[in-house]
Image (spheres, grey):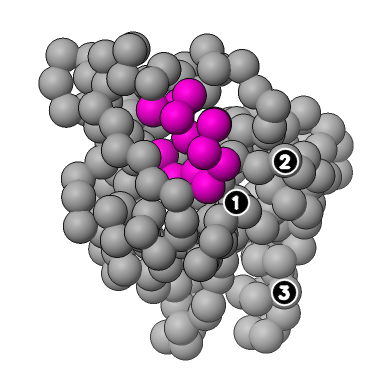
Amino acid sequence: MSYAGRVRILVVEDEARLRTLLHRGLTEEGHVVDAVADGPTGLWHAVEQPYDVVVLDVMLPGLDGLAVCRQLRERGSRVPVLLLTARDTVPDRIRGLDAGADDYLVKPFAFGELTARCRALSRRGPVERGVVLAVGDLVMDPASRVVTRAGTPVSLTAQEYTVLEVFLRHPGRVLDRSFLLDRAWDFAYEANSNVIDQYVAALRRKLDKPFGRDDFETVRGSGYRLRS
């Protein structure tokens, strides 16, 4: 965070009334706020200026919010991103997470909830780059965000990468859905959501099947385990 509770926030929202309300409300809360109306301008600001949080609408002219978020991550920016969207289905959330977003807020929303989420994201700060994680020949380098299996690079989406990181930090341990949801997402899913099953299936498809492995194990009635 910048200083004494003040958060530097970039708002990228094309709806003029909402953009003005967010700028005014966040400024009155004591934060430092820039507000822009289109994707290319938002991307430029987010790359060139130091922000604690980016509040990013999905539907934007010039470059949509998912593309802006994806390009930010491709350029190495780890600034926390809060997506604003009118859609609230699991596939929509998955697309946002795969683009590299950290949190998700559905319109219409309460202003107090937005400010609370911004504060939470700013406290967490950019994702830290740590030491290389490895389980057998499955290797993740957080500095370069490269994942390899048996020396072969494997392309993962941003959220697949995050879920894999949770497994690599707890090899051999049975992880239930609540544990995975808590550590791989910054907003709430119900514990019985099938979103975890979808991501484990994707990791198996990319990291197990092509290499003749079966390391992502289902522990019936308990959760999943990455065999160590």
Question: Secondary structure beneath disc 1?
Answer: loop
- Type of the residue with mark 2: Ala
Q: Name the residue tied to disc 1.
A: 58
Question: Few, some or many C-alpha atoms within 10 Å of disc 1 (few <14, some 14-19, many ≥20)?
Answer: many
Label 2 – label 1 distance at C-alpha: 8 Å
Position of the N terminus by quadrant: top left
Q: Could you say where residue 123 lies in the image, as x and y percent from the top left?
A: 32, 25
Give the camera-side residue of 47 and 137. Answer: 47
* Up-down relation of residue 126 to residue 42 (above or below): above
The range drawn in magenta is 11-23
Q: Could you say where residue 47 lies in the image, as x and y percent from the top left?
A: 26, 59
Q: Could you say where residue 95 lies in the image, as x and y percent from the top left?
A: 66, 58
Give the dominant element type of the magenta stretch: helix, strand or loop. helix
Q: Could you say where residue 214 lies in the image, as x and y percent from the top left?
A: 71, 70
Q: Name the residue tied to disc 3.
A: 205
* Up-down relation of residue 48 to residue 10 (above or below): below
- Type of the residue with mark 3: Arg
Q: Are marks 2 and 3 in contact (CB under 8 Å)?
A: no
Q: Earlier in the sequence, mark 2 or mark 3?
A: 2
Q: Let me know if residue 211 appears in the view.
A: yes
